[in-house]
C-alpha cells in the first residue's frame, strides 16, 4: 500500500520518534508499505515520521550491489562511530524538488535492529553513511535544511513559498 508522504512544513516532521518495542505483524506491514512508498516516489530513504508514524525506524536502498538493489530496514538506530567529513548534495521526499549541499560524517558505524528484533551492525561510508544520517535525523525531527546556514535555509523556504503560490508544491500535513 502506498502511504502519503508528509511534506514540509508539516508539524509531524518536527516531532521526536519513540523506540520500537514490538516486532510484530503491524511493524512488518508498516515496513513493507514504506518500501513500496519509497520505491514509488523514487527515493533512496524513507523514515517513519515522513508517513506520519512517530517510531524510530526507516527504510533505505542506496541502489548498490550486483542488481542495483540494496534494501535495508533500520530499527532503533544508534551511532557507534561517526568520523570524517564530506560535503555532498542532498534532497528529501518531504521537501520535494529542493536540494542543497550538506556536510555529513564520511564514515559511520550504526547498531540497529531488524524486523524480528535481532541486533545488527552496519559500517558505511559516503552515500550509504549519508542516507543513514539523513534518515536518523528524521527520527529527531530534524530536516536537512536545518543543517544549512540560515541564508541558504531562507532561500529554500522562499523558493518553496513561491512554488506553493504557483501550485507547484503540495503540502501534506
Ligand atoms: Co528526508
Image: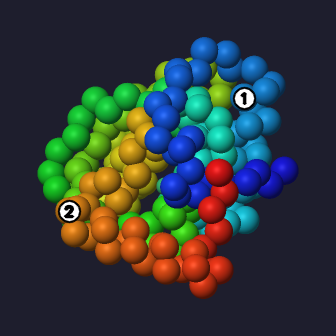
Q: Where's residue 43, x and y in %?
A: 58, 64
Query: Left or right: 110 with respect to 10?
Result: left
Q: Where's residue 73, x and y in %?
A: 58, 40
Disc 2 residue: CB within 8 Å of ligand 1: no
Q: Quadrant of residue 87?
A: bottom left
Judge whether 92 appears above or below 132 on screen: below
Q: Residues within 10 Å of mark 1 (few under 14, many from 20)?
A: some
The label on residue 149 is: 2
The label on residue 27 is: 1
Query: Left or right: 68 with respect to 125?
Result: right
Query: Left or right: 106 with respect to 8?
Result: left
- Name the residue furthest top: 21
Q: Where's residue 34, x and y in %?
A: 69, 47
Question: Does the image show residue 65?
Answer: no
- Name the residue furthest right: 1
Indicate the secondary structure of the residue bearing disc 2. loop
Q: Nearer the viewer, mark 1 or mark 2?
A: 2
Nearer the observer, 140 or 132 = 140
Indicate the secondary structure of the residue bearing disc 1. helix
Q: Where's residue 29, x and y in %?
A: 79, 36
How far apart are the two marked residues, 1 and 2, measured between alpha carbons?
37 Å
- Name the residue furthest front: 165
Judge whether 139 appears above or below 142 on screen: above
Judge whether 65 appears above or below 46 on screen: below
Nearer the observer, 53 or 136 = 53
Disc 1 residue: CB within 8 Å of ligand 1: no
Amino acid at each position: 500500500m502506498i502511504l502519503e508522504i508528509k511534506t514540509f512544513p508539516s508539524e509531524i516532521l518536527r516531532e521526536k520518534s519513540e523506540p520500537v518495542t514490538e516486532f510484530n505483524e503491524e511493524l512488518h506491514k508498516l515496513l513493507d508499505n514504506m518500501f513500496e512508498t519509497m520505491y514509488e516516489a523514487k527515493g533512496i530513504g524513507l523514515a517513519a515520521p515522513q508517513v506520519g508514524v512517530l517510531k524510530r525506524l526507516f527504510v533505505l536502498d542506496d541502489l548498490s550491489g550486483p542488481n542495483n538493489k540494496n534494501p535495508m530496514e533500520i530499527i532503533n538506530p544508534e551511532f557507534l562511530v561517526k568520523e570524517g567529513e564530506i560535503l555532498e548534495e542532498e534532497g528529501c521526499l518531504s521537501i520535494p524538488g529542493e536540494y542543497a549541499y550538506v556536510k555529513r560524517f564520511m564514515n559511520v558505524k550504526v547498531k540497529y535492529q531488524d524486523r524480528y528484533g535481532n541486533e545488527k551492525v552496519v559500517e558505511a561510508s559516503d552515500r550509504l553513511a549519508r542516507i543513514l544520517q539523513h534518515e536518523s535525523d528524521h527520527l529527531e525531527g530534524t530536516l536537512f535544511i536545518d543543517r544549512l546556514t540560515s541564508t541558504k535555509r531562507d532561500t529554500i523556504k522562499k523558493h518553496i513559498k513561491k512554488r506553493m503560490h504557483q501550485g507547484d508544491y503540495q503540502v501534506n500535513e
